[in-house]
């Protein structure tokens, strides 16, 4: 059965990591620009429909991404009862985060909206069929230290979520990755051919790959994405510009497809 894409957008970013976390997190420069340009492009005409949200620095909270467990939930981790994703992450079709990260999750700039980290075992996304795609402009989130390691960690997050996009190594703090990603999604990148007013974007995963290629040097190009389903799943064809996306009715729920680009090895001295 087709799933409606109502094109609602959520974005959060952190530049200011001045709070004395241990270990210390270094402040960034361009995350605000990445998130704002991503958000602005996708919420322009023939883009998103309200309500949408964007928050940054002290207004970007880890609990916005974390599962809203209740004390009555039998499977609720006792330490993770502060999530508020029902009011934020779960209200949009696509979610974008720009800031620091690691293989365990997303890192925020304030410690008092839970603990400043949204970890994979605190997140469950796509329940209710709303959130479909999650892009994380942060280092090492989809790191693959052993075969299927990324899927083992992050597979539990997919409760209706279709695709997750990030990096498997470090990425640089650059000013235009969010903009380029949104342009490819929406079909307005300067290299794309426009047929009248009917904009057709690249697929979700290819848009991310192209944005990373355009904003990374060859030696550091390390895009990665994880999607639900086998390699032939209809999910691979998801596009932001589609009014509907097709449900995968053939793949087992615990099957994931992981892809990454491994940068060329640098020569030793």
Image (cartoon, rainbow, N blue to C red):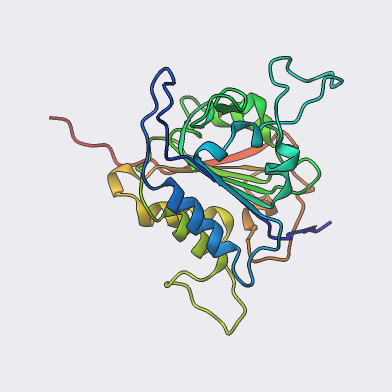
Quarter residue 161 falls in? top right
Q: Is residue 83 above or below residue 258?
A: above
Looking at the image, can residue 160 be seen? no
Q: Can you say which quadrant of the picture contains the N terminus?
A: bottom right
Query: Residue 55 at x, y = what percent?
Result: 57, 45
Of 228 and 233, nearer the camera is 228
Q: Can you say which quadrant of the picture contains the C terminus?
A: top left
Of 97 and 15, nearer the camera is 15
Residue appearing at x 66%, y 63% in the figure: 48
Q: Residue furthest bottom?
A: 196
Q: Residue furthest right?
A: 72
Residue appearing at x 51%, y 32% in the figure: 108
Q: Left or right: where does residue 185 sit relative to residue 125?
A: left
Q: Is residue 88 above or below residue 9?
A: above
Query: Residue 24 at x, y = what percent?
Result: 38, 22
Of 192 and 92, nearer the camera is 92
Residue appearing at x 42%, y 32% in the figure: 17
Q: Is residue 44 above or below residue 97?
A: below
Q: Residue furthest top?
A: 78
Of 99 and 233, nearer the camera is 99
Q: Left or right: where does residue 229 sit relative to residue 249?
A: left
Quarter residue 195 falls in? bottom right
Query: Residue 176 at x, y = what percent?
Result: 40, 56
Q: Left or right: where does residue 217 sit relative to residue 258?
A: left
Residue appearing at x 55%, y 52% in the figure: 205
Query: Residue 34 at x, y = what percent?
Result: 45, 52
């Amino acid at each position: 059965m087709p799933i409606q894409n109502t094109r609602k957008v959520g974005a959060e970013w952190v530049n200011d990591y001045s709070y004395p976390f241990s270990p210390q997190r270094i402040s960034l420069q361009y995350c605000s620009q990445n998130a704002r340009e991503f958000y602005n492009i996708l919420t322009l005409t023939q883009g998103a429909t309200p309500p949408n949200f964007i928050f940054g620095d002290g207004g970007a909270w880890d609990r916005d991404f974390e599962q809203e467990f209740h004390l009555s939930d039998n499977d609720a981790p006792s330490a993770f009862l502060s999530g508020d994703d029902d009011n934020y992450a779960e209200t949009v079709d696509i979610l974008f985060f720009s800031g620091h990260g690691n293989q365990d999750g997303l890192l925020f700039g304030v410690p008092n909206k839970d603990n400043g980290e949204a970890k994979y075992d605190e997140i469950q996304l796509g329940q209710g069929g709303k959130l479909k795609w999650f892009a994380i402009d942060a280092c090492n989130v989809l790191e693959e230290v052993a075969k299927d390691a990324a899927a083992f960690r992050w597979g539990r997050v997919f409760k209706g979520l279709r695709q997750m996009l990030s990096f498997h190594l470090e990425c640089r703090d650059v000013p235009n990755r969010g903009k380029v990603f949104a342009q490819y999604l929406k079909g307005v990148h300067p290299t794309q051919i426009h047929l009248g007013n009917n904009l057709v974007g690249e697929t979700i995963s290819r848009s991310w790959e192209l944005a990373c290629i355009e904003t990374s040097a060859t030696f550091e190009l390390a895009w990665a994405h994880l999607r639900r389903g086998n390699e032939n799943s209809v999910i691979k064809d998801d596009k932001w510009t589609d009014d509907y996306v097709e449900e995968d009715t053939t793949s087992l729920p615990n099957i994931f497809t992981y892809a990454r680009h491994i940068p060329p090895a640098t020569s030793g001295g």
